[in-house]
Image (spheres, grey):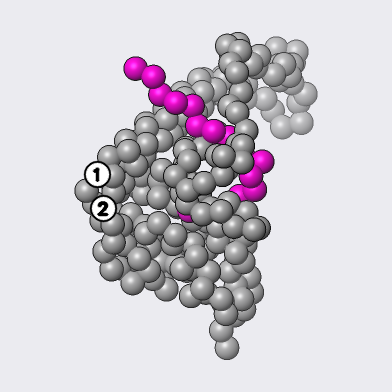
Amino acid sequence: MESTEKFTTSKEVIAFLAETFPKCFSIEGEALPLKIGIFQDLAQRLDDEERVSKTLLRSTLRHYTNSWRYLYSIKEGTHRVDLDGEKGEAIEKEHSDHAQKQLEESKAKAAEKRKAKLAQQPKRSEKRQFNRPKGEKPTNSAQPEAKRGTKPKNNRPNTTPPAKLTEDDMKQGTRVTVKLGKEPMPAAITEIAKDGIHVQLDTGMVVKVKADALRLARSKRS
């Protein structure tokens, strides 16, 4: 009998999606750009699937579309696919440029983490040089370093926070930013519903949020 135990991690859900919709999702090799609104399609097709909650499904899609492998696939002119692998609209240059920027920022953060990790390795190697007989207490020189204070935050320039949306802004096509993770993500309003506002992220993903989670996107000046 097939297990009905609920999935608890994005990794489990991605593996399930790759097995259930192999022409749309994958766990290795080149990824395919997903159709805008793919979450709604998944929610409908998996309505009777007890192992996948909509909350975990939404966070899994966010994890999947933020991966390096997926961001590589967002290229201008490439066609998005639906759950059955059927081609849809082509990716616009704006979406391609945003995905490339996300990819570069993610790689830069990973490089900083690797650099910090390497900087700690000599300290661990030095500690291994103290070969003491079993049971002998360490001398003062071998005592672990005192706990250091937290790293001071970088000084950031004071900037005017983005404006909240007015009634006139609540319409399709309005450019906004929505905070889904640590950083606000650019998007556009696609639908105004009673229980929330549907916005399309520049990566192609569509999510529903409350109005107070949105801010007007800053206009770009040359």
Q: Classify the position of the C terminus by image quarter.
A: top left
The verdict on residue 220 being magenta is yes
Residue 27 picture location, percent across and down: 39, 59
| Mark earlier in primary sequence (2, 1) | 1
* Residue indicated by mark 1: 76
> To which quarter of the image does residue 130 belong?
top right
> To which quarter of the image does residue 165 belong?
top right
How many circles with numbers are drawn on the protein? Answer: 2
Q: Amino acid at mark 1?
A: Glu
The verdict on residue 115 being magenta is no
**Residue 90, disc:** 2
Q: Nearer the viewer, residue 15 or 97?
A: 97
Q: Residue at x 64, y 44 (%)?
A: 211
What are the residue bounds of the magenta stretch? 206-222
Q: Relative to residue 187, is residue 193 drawn left or right?
A: right
Q: Is residue 207 above or below residue 104?
A: below
Q: Nearer the viewer, residue 67 or 76?
A: 76
Residue 93 picture location, percent across and down: 27, 40
Q: Are marks 2 and 1 in contact (CB under 8 Å)?
A: yes
Q: Residue at x 53, y 69 (%)?
A: 43
Residue 212 picture location, percent across and down: 66, 41
